[in-house]
Amino acid sequence: MLFYIFAAIAILSGAYMVLTRNLLYAGFSLLLTLLSVAAIYVLLFADFVAVTQLMVYVGGVLVLILFGIMLSSRVHDKSVMSENTNVGWGITISLLTLIGLSYTIWRAGFSSLPWIQQAGTDVLSGQKSTVQLIGIKLMTDFVLPFEVASLLLLIALMGAAYIATAKQKV
Amino acid sequence: MITQIPLEHILLLSAALFAIGVLAVISKRHAVMVLMGIELIFNAANLNLVAFSRHDPQLMQGQLFSLFVILVAAAEAAVALAIVLRVYQHFKTANLNQVASKEG
């Protein structure tokens, strides 16, 4: 029941994000969408992913997007409004995508796949949280992606700082 | 025990978020709006990964992959917003159609 409430909030605020033309309103409705997706992660027994979503998306990416809006447009100006373009094509393509995906999901019958049937409903099998298991996996099976990710973050940080600073003529 | 959410409903929610993100990417002119649509698409993909990870016997592969997706999305947002700022400083607009019609 809780899932449907959060799903409705996510879809409604996502739709408002597309419908509104004010960039700041769009940013805050994206905040609502991200928060309800984090709540859905909790309902799907993924507590660590939910906390990461809160910290990285809501605490990081969204603040970055709001900074981007404020730095790339004057708030009391028309430039904070985003005009629409290609509305007909956009609605057509996204509706076709939605219909195609829904039809595929409905026809595929994922719930009757054998490996999903075999998995029990007691997914956590007595564990209270997934944090310990994720920590062990990150240090054993996924240690190479983990290290590559740290390198990627370092490169992205340096690149973003280099691109965003005004170039000085030497 | 919480009653199990049907897998199809989660996938349908994710498909709806994906369609909304595609609509935002196609039909918005402001570059930051396009970035927001891309974030929404990332979230839809993550929702799928976590939903299937619930049925994973080893339990963790989908969630770990979604963690890496979140990480790459954060790096992408930082670099993309830096590029948007540079474009705004250079062209004095962040409107993609106007940027496309101007020359460097």
Image: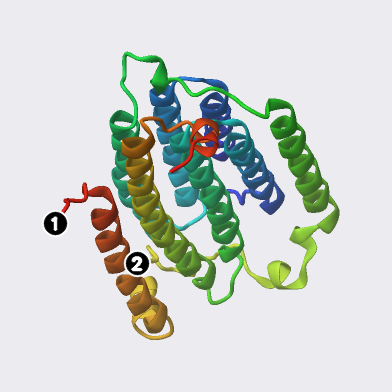
Asked whether the viewer can see residue B2, the reply is no
Q: Quadrant of residue A70?
A: top left
User: In front of the other: label 1 or label 2?
Assistant: 1
Q: Quadrant of residue B101?
A: top right
Q: Name the residue under label 1.
A: A170
The disc labelled 2 sits on which kind of residue?
A: Val
Quadrant occupied by the C terminus of chain B: top left
Quick check: A65 left or right of A83?
left
Disc 1 or 2, which lies upstream in sequence?
Answer: 2
- Viewer-side residue, B71 vs B1: B71
Q: Which chain carries label 1?
A: A
Q: Specify the label residue A131 is tagged with.
A: 2
Report how far apart the C-alphas of labels 1 and 2 lie in the structure: 50 Å
Colour scheme of the picture: rainbow
Residue A94, given in percent of the width and then of the height, sits at 71, 38
- Viewer-side residue, B29 vs A102: B29
